Image (spheres, rainbow, N blue to C red):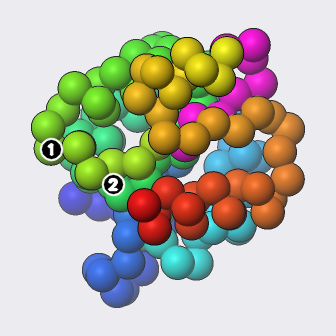
Amino acid sequence: MTLEHEEESSNRPTLLVCEDEESLRELVRVVVGPGFRLAEAGDGVEASAKARELRPDVVVLDLMLPLRHGLYVLRDIRRDPALSHTRVLAITAGDHPEESVLAEGADRMLRKPFEPGQLKAAVEELLAA
């Protein structure tokens, strides 16, 4: 299991960032990265595979991913018993109703654009849950 930004300390929680825009992946790395072992996925197929492989503590999941929509990735995560502990923060610039996204199994949702502090607070809240 190789994490792109793995820290020496393996007791840090794992955060999987599923986002096709490099600038937003960079934002997550800068805002919440120091306390986590980070892994990234740039499309929905890779996101589902990495979630199964890494069993992250928290997933930041863009809903509008190429190759496989984020809602399908969310369903993959929720249907996998090995990922039952995984918390999911859905992020979107689309018009997905928050109630529907939460009903699909997301623990929280943020609409783009969001403030870096909102992202950090949401990830910390999910990790504490």
Which residue is painted at 56% across and 62% down in the image? 125
Q: Name the residue nearer the viewer: 60 or 84.
A: 84
Task: Answer left or right for 100 relative to 117.
Answer: left
Q: Quadrant of the N terminus?
A: bottom left
Q: Earlier in the sequence, mark 2 or mark 1?
A: 2
Instruction: Determine which quarter of the picture holds residue 79.
Output: top left
Task: Answer left or right for 82 relative to 123.
Answer: left
Where residue 94 sits: x, y (%)?
74, 17
CB-based contact (under 8 Å), mark 2 and mark 1: no
What element does badge 2 sit on? loop
Q: Name the residue nearer the viewer: 122 or 14.
A: 122
Question: Which residue was labeled with disc 1?
Answer: 82
Question: Which residue was labeled with disc 2?
Answer: 56
Q: Which amino acid type is shown beneath numbered disc 2?
A: Pro
Mark 1 surroundings within 10 Å by alpha-carbon count, few (fewer than 14), some (14 through 19), many (20 or more) = few
The correct choice, above or below, for 82 with respect to 106 in the image is below
Which residue is painted at 54% across and 22% down in the image? 101
Which residue is painted at 29% across and 24% down in the image? 76
Inspect the magenta stretch and tell me whether residue 108 lies in it: no
The correct choice, above or below, for 100 with respect to 109 in the image is above
Residue 4 seen: no
The correct choice, above or below, for 21 with respect to 103 in the image is below
Q: Name the residue nearer the viewer: 31 or 6.
A: 31
Task: Answer left or right for 114 relative to 32.
Answer: right
Q: Which mark is residue 6?
A: none
Which residue is painted at 68% across and 63% down in the image? 120
Which stretch appears magenta?
89-96
- Mark 2–mark 1 distance (CA, rounded to whole Å): 10 Å
Instruction: Determine which quarter of the picture holds residue 97.
Output: top right
